[in-house]
Image (cartoon, rainbow, N blue to C red):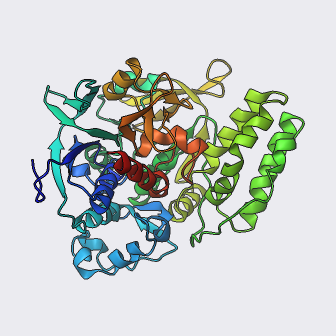
């Protein structure tokens, strides 16, 4: 398809239409200086511009980050331009149009999709054309003779291009083994982050005994939503009892830089290591820094940290402890949800339990859940519930699309979480080579964020994480396209 200039455009296929994929397409449109056709593949049209994490329902739920942290692009002030644009506000959900967004308070989740769509609407580049394809990408193949890339969709259709941007983490909901036989049960919500899950949660009887699996952001949000509807027999279950930290109501960034490596590197024993690590976090938290500010300050020392731990006592254990601190301290819950749950606990409407589920049986119209302190042995007890919500979380790169790339050696896992990429964002193959034709943005780079990029930790997906790597990756792609 020739462009207005008459020359054949370079074709770039983007797999995934959430925030990462949509913003990749937008930035391509902003930066292209030669003819370009952007082909965007998304299996769920309603999730374009938002993905699974930023769906426009329910309207009253906020993200865990302040408005000032949710900007896209290179200009931090642009999001406030959008907030004040009457024409843009006309597209907001009706109940939010009169809302006055505060720079330091959480950004409504229902507005993320509108914001990302607005950024796309401002692309005005005659060299760029967009084409939407609805379908589920199942396989990516490289043609050595033509230098082209082919994407096969479920059903057999093929989409070809010169480059592919993998913007799909192929995120599937985690279903624990003890819940597998109840996947289709009408009183079990396997995936609450779908319209069906949302509808079914809203229909739960207010006097029902509800078990919510997982104390992460999803689990806490489900408890908060039910609590606001008048539910008073709620239980959240966590295997280890970990709870994410809570943001302050006013989220102000306080940039932090460390003049020297963290003191916990010099610890002599695991116990001292844990103590120093706790003191390290506590010192900077009390000074007003958020955990992601602290982790951003640690990241320049990551290689040195690994080298130091590489020659000390119980290396693997210490690295595991440090990475666990990343997972817990890099994901914060919103102030509103945290305060709501604290009140519910104090009033007895919500209980937070700790333990490992070994079995779930349906008896006499209720679920009998066997819970123990240890996943393999030790005493157990039974608890009874009417409904179960699975909020354990989601997995990434668990999909035939990624399975094929890994099986053929075109991709390699990174940190056991995501996919290895080069410093520029190219897919790394099994031999360590960087692809010039397959590039990666978004959630699939979770392991990469542990080591190099982003400011929100190793598994939490959010706008700052995308912002940290996407623009440099697209600039590098355009330079070689």
The answer to whether 184 appears left or right of 245 in the picture is: left
Q: Residue at x 66, y 28 (%)?
A: 373
Front residue of 204 and 154: 154
Q: Looking at the figure, which quarter contains the C terminus?
A: top left
Q: Splitting the image into 4 quarters, where does residue 339 fall?
A: bottom right
Find residue 347 and report its horizontal and vertical position in percent: 57, 59
* 282 with respect to 70 (left or right): right
- Image x and y of residue 354, in percent: 62, 37
Q: Which residue is located at x 46 percent, y 49 percent?
A: 461
Q: Nearer the viewer, residue 413 or 127?
A: 127
The answer to which of 110 and 401 lies nearer the viewer is 401
Residue 348 horizontal/vertical position (percent): 57, 54
Is residue 281 depicted above or below 443 in this figure? below
Which residue is drawn at the image coordinates 80% and 42% (left, top)? 274
Q: Is residue 263 left or right of residue 447?
A: right
Answer yes or no: is residue 410 visible: yes
In the rendered image, the vertical position of residue 395 relative to residue 346, given as above or below: above
Q: Is residue 40 visible?
A: no
Q: Decide: is 380 above or below 298.
A: above
List the single residue furthest toward the right: 268
Spot occupied by residue 238 in the image (x, y as percentages of width and height): 57, 38
**Total numbered circles:** 0
């Amino acid at each position: 398809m020739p462009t207005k200039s008459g020359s054949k455009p370079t074709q770039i296929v983007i797999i995934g239409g959430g925030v990462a994929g949509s913003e990749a397409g937008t930035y391509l449109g902003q930066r292209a200086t030669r003819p370009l056709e952007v082909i965007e593949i998304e299996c769920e049209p309603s999730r374009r511009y938002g993905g699974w994490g930023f769906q426009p329902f329910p309207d009253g739920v906020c993200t865990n980050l302040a408005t000032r942290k949710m900007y896209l692009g290179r200009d931090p002030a642009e999001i406030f331009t959008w907030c004040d644009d009457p024409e843009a506000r006309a597209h907001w959900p009706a109940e939010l149009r009169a809302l006055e967004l505060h720079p330091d308070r959480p950004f409504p989740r229902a507005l993320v999709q509108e914001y990302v769509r607005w950024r796309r609407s401002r692309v005005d580049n005659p060299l760029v054309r967009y084409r939407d394809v609805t379908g589920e990408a199942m396989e990516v193949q490289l043609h050595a003779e033509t230098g082209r890339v082919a994407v096969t969709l479920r059903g057999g259709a093929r989409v070809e291009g010169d480059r592919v941007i993998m913007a799909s983490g192929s995120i599937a909901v985690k279903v624990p083994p003890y819940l597998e036989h109840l996947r289709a049960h009408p009183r079990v919500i396997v995936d609450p982050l779908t319209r069906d899950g949302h509808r079914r949660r809203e229909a739960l009887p207010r006097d029902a005994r509800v078990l919510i699996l997982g104390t992460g952001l999803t689990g806490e949000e489900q408890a908060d939503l039910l609590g606001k509807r008048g539910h008073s027999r709620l239980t959240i279950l966590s295997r280890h009892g970990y709870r994410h930290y809570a943001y302050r109501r006013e989220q102000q960034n306080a940039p932090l830089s460390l003049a020297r490596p963290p003191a916990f590197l010099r610890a002599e024993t695991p116990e001292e290591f844990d103590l120093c690590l706790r003191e390290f976090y506590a010192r900077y938290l009390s000074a007003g820094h958020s955990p992601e500010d602290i982790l951003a300050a640690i990241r320049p020392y990551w290689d040195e940290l690994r080298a130091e731990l590489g020659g000390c006592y119980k290396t693997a254990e210490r690295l595991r402890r440090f990475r666990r601190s990343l997972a817990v301290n890099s994901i914060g819950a919103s102030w509103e949800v945290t305060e709501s749950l604290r009140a519910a606990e104090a009033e007895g409407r919500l209980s937070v339990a700790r333990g490992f589920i070994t079995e779930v049986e349906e008896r006499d119209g209720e679920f009998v859940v066997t819970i123990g302190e240890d996943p393999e042995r030790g005493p157990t007890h039974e608890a009874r519930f009417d409904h179960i919500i699975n909020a354990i979380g989601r997995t990434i790169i668990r999909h035939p699309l990624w399975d094929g790339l890994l099986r053929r050696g075109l991709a390699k896992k990174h940190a056991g979480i995501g996919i290895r990429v080069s410093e520029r964002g190219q897919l790394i193959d099994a031999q360590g080579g960087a692809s010039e034709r397959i590039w990666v943005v978004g959630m699939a780079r979770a392991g990469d964020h542990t080591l190099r990029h982003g400011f929100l930790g190793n598994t939490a997906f959010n706008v700052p994480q995308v912002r940290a790597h996407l623009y440099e990756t697209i600039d590098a792609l355009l330079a070689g396209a």
